[in-house]
């Protein structure tokens, strides 16, 4: 069964043919984070896809993964691309290195999961939180409920983690 929903006035549509993403979001709807682990080499992969990017084996096993990591990079958006985003600028798009499988299969690699910076209850973060976050900030995954059967994985500041003294931020005007 496909998933259809609206998020900030944008249509989200996952086709009934997209088995990997339907399974990924089925877990997400229950606020659980699962990734596919290759049955041959054992490596996890993200985003969900049909075959292992390292050994090409198509078989995988859905595995629960801890949603914790550190910001690898980010984009701070000041110009809304959609009218419904106008009330939320500036907002952050984060690329997060998961702690799980960091440095594998080579030292530079990690599972890098994209999401917005949100408050702990899953709402796009206000400017005072946006200013606190940069490269190195420790974050944890939370879910923004969109519709029955659909929640988006997002990121919030990990209050229980030791944070860098000064996360790296792009020079501000
Ligand atoms: Zn593999």
Image (cartoon, helix red, strand yellow):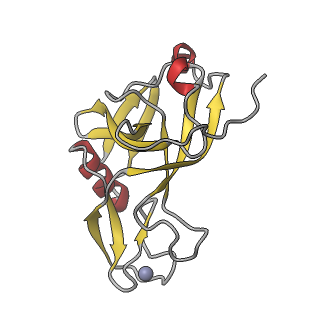
Ligand 1 appears in which quadrant? bottom left
Visible residue check, residue 1: no
Residue at (72, 35) in percent of width and height: 170
Query: 105 or 83, which lies in front?
Result: 105
Is residue 94 placed above or below 113 in the rendered structure? above
Residue, x 34% and y 72% (percent of image)?
37
Query: Would residue 149 be visible to someone looking at this image?
Result: yes
Residue plotted at (42% across, 83% down): 57
Q: Quadrant of residue 94?
A: top right
Q: Position of residue 93 (x, y in %)?
A: 56, 37
Residue 98 falls left or right of residue 134: left
Q: How many marks?
A: 0
Q: Is residue 40 above or below residue 114?
A: below
For the residue pair 3 and 71, the one nearer the viewer reads as: 71
* Residue 120 position in % (x across, y down): 34, 30
Q: Is residue 36 above or below residue 33?
A: below
Q: Is residue 77 above or below residue 151?
A: above
* Residue drawn at the location 66% of the way across and 40% of the way down: 168
Q: Quadrant of the C terminus?
A: top right
Furthest toward the top, the residue is 87
């Amino acid at each position: 069964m496909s998933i259809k929903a609206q998020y900030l006035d944008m249509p989200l549509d996952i086709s009934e043919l997209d088995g990997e993403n339907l399974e990924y979001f089925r877990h997400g709807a229950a606020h659980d984070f699962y990734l596919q682990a290759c049955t041959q080499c054992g490596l996890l992969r993200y985003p969900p896809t049909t075959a292992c990017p390292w050994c090409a084996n198509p078989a995988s096993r859905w595995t629960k993964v801890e949603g914790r990591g550190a910001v690898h990079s980010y984009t701070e958006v000041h110009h809304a691309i959609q009218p419904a985003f106008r009330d939320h600028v500036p907002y952050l798009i984060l690329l997060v290195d998961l702690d799980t499988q960091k440095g594998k299969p080579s030292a530079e690699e990690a599972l890098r999961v994209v999401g917005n910076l949100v408050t702990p209850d899953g709402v796009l973060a206000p400017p005072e939180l946006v200013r606190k976050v940069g490269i190195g900030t420790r974050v944890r995954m939370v879910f923004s409920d969109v519709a029955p059967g659909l929640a988006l994985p997002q990121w919030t500041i990990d209050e229980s983690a030791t944070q860098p003294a000064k996360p790296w931020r792009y020079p501000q005007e």
